[in-house]
Image (spheres, rainbow, N blue to C red):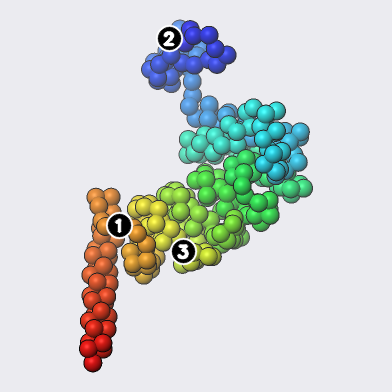
Amino acid sequence: MNKAPSDVVRLSHASVKDYLLSVNVRQDKAAFYALNMALANQNIVETCLLYLMAPAIHDGALTLYQQGRRLEKWPLLLYAAHFWLHHINANEKLEDRTWQLMQSFFATRELPKCGNFGLWAKTLTPVTPFEFIGHTSTLYYAASFGMAPVVRNLLKFSPEDLHRLGCRYKSTPLQSAAFRGHYSVVKLLLDAGSDFRTASYPSNGTPLVWALRRYKWDVATMLLQYGATRSDVEYVVLKTNIGGPDDDWPDILTEYWYKKTIIYKLRTRKRRNDKIQKTGD
């Protein structure tokens, strides 16, 4: 263990963690200290949710000043709000006990100012106005933050939220997931029937447009495979400073880039020549 004076206990080396997670540790005298990664992640998720559900912080979304004071009094709030998302994704399966606790947490959004749920959302995105939190579905948040196991369950219990617009840009869960490059979540939403043609206000960006603009090539390729229109590729190539192809570009996009760039140059040259000809006349 780290012998330096500290209130924090740390493992001295990553190899210690590897040993505690190994099969060998369960077969010797140190078996008491053996760790189960899946169980550890589940316990951390449930602990974070219980922390976020504390009755003392059920008053919902706060002002930035109030939020700052709250963080001083609740030192684990930032970790609980941000990192249960990471731990939930570390396990492929969502245990029934964890899901039931999660549903109780989601239900707090019915309280004034969206209750504990609103506090969590405000902690994640402090500048988001409260009214957007209230009108944004739980599925949207889960998709936006890449929580694939949660999205999978919400699609079973709240399928009506699949096309519901949310957040400041009035976008769908699919648009948000594509924007952030959450491949597994995008696939879940597409398989559930999410409309990849929906364009958000004010950018008029479909999921494919956002995936391309954010250089999420794997997501863009999948959207094209699911039938997204190639006109979105043309829109991005001609209207944005996306640059030229490189090794990360999917073949279908590289081919389209060259085709549309050449067409664009030819059209520009023709307009310039027509203008010169009219001036000469």
What is the three-letter code of the residue carrying label 2? Asp
CB atoms of marks 3 and 1 within 8 Å: no
Q: Residue at x 50, y 61 (%)?
A: 194
Question: Which residue is tagged 3?
Answer: 205
Question: Looking at the image, is mark 3 or mark 1 earlier in the sequence?
Answer: 3
In the shown orientation, is residue 137 left or right of residue 278? Answer: right
Residue 225, above or below 177: below
Tell us which disc is closer to us: 3 or 1: 1
- Per the rendering, the mark at residue 20 is none
Question: Which residue is tagged 1?
Answer: 243
In the shown orientation, is residue 39 left or right of residue 254? Answer: right
Residue 280, above or below 46: below
Gap between marks 3 and 2, in whole Å? Answer: 58 Å
Residue 27 rendering spot, x and y as whole percentages: 42, 13
In the shown orientation, is residue 20 left or right of residue 61? Answer: left
Question: Looking at the image, is mark 1 or mark 2 earlier in the sequence?
Answer: 2
**Res 105 → quadrant:** top right
Quarter of the picture containing the C terminus is bottom left
What is the three-letter code of the residue carrying label 1? Gly
Number of other residues with Cα within 10 Å of mark 3, as a class: few under 14, some 14 to 19, many 20 or more: many
Q: Nearer the viewer, residue 211 or 275?
A: 275
Q: Looking at the image, can residue 262 be seen?
A: yes
Tell us which disc is closer to us: 1 or 2: 1
Residue 198 rendering spot, x and y as whole percentages: 50, 66
**Res 100 → quadrant:** top right
Q: Residue at x 56, y 37 (%)?
A: 82
Judged from the image, the secondary structure of the residue bearing numbered disc 1 is: loop
Question: Which residue is tagged 2?
Answer: 28
Q: Residue at x 77, y 48 (%)?
A: 112
Gap between marks 3 and 1, in whole Å? Answer: 18 Å
